């Protein structure tokens, strides 16, 4: 594409190359996975070094998945945060 073509198309609205709409099914799955990670973090033995490392990893995964799940669910139902 030449610079002239880019200059002529500069006034057109930008469109995302990837679909940016949220998926409710995906967000509910992320929330369910966060509950699974929380259960794994709770049930695991935290008295050993490996157990405490797994606890930290499962807790971080649970926090990330519930965060992204609730944000995408809020976006899907139309609540703007």
Image (cartoon, rainbow, N blue to C red):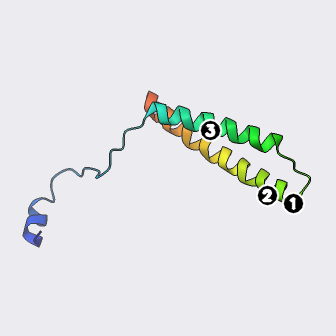
Which image quarter is the N terminus in? bottom left
Q: Is residue 68 left or right of residue 40?
A: left
Q: Is residue 8 above or below residue 36?
A: below
Judge left or right: residue 26 versus residue 18.
right
What's the residue at 87%, 50% (across, down)?
46
Q: Percent position (x, y) of residue 54?
A: 77, 54
Q: Give percent across and percent down for residue 26.
A: 49, 36
Residue 76, picture quadrant? top left
Regarding mark 3 in the picture, which secondary structure is present there?
helix
Report helix, strand or loop for mark 2.
helix
Q: Residue 61 at what x, y percent from top left?
A: 66, 49
Callout 2: 10 Å neighbours few (<14), some, many (20+)? few
- Could you say where residue 79 lies in the image, as x and y percent from the top left? 47, 31
Is residue 10 shown left or right of residue 41? left
Whole-Å distance between the Cαs marked 2 and 3? 19 Å
| Residue nearer the viewer, 66 or 50 | 50
Q: Residue at x 46, y 31 (%)?
A: 24
Question: Going by the image, does 61 lie left or right of 44?
Answer: left
Disc 1 crowd rating (10 Å Cα; few below 14, some 14-19, many 20+) is few
Labelled pair 3, 1 in contact (Cβ < 8 Å): no
Q: Residue furthest bottom?
A: 3
The residue at which mark 3 appears reads as 33
3D distance between C-alphas at marks 3 and 1: 24 Å
- N-terminal label among 2 and 3: 3
Pointer 3: residues within 10 angstroms few (<14), some, or many (20+)? some
Q: Which mark is residue 49?
A: 1
State if disc 1 and disc 2 touch (CB < 8 Å).
Answer: yes
The residue at which mark 2 appears reads as: 53
Splitting the image into 4 quarters, where does residue 6 fall?
bottom left
């Amino acid at each position: 594409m030449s610079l002239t073509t880019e200059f002529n198309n500069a006034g057109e609205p930008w469109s995302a190359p990837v679909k940016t709409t949220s998926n409710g099914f995906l967000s509910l799955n992320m929330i369910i996975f966060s509950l699974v990670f929380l259960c794994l973090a709770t049930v695991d033995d935290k008295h050993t070094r490996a157990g405490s490392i797994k606890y930290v990893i499962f807790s971080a995964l649970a926090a990330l998945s519930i965060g992204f799940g609730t944000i995408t669910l809020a976006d899907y139902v139309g609540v703007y945060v």
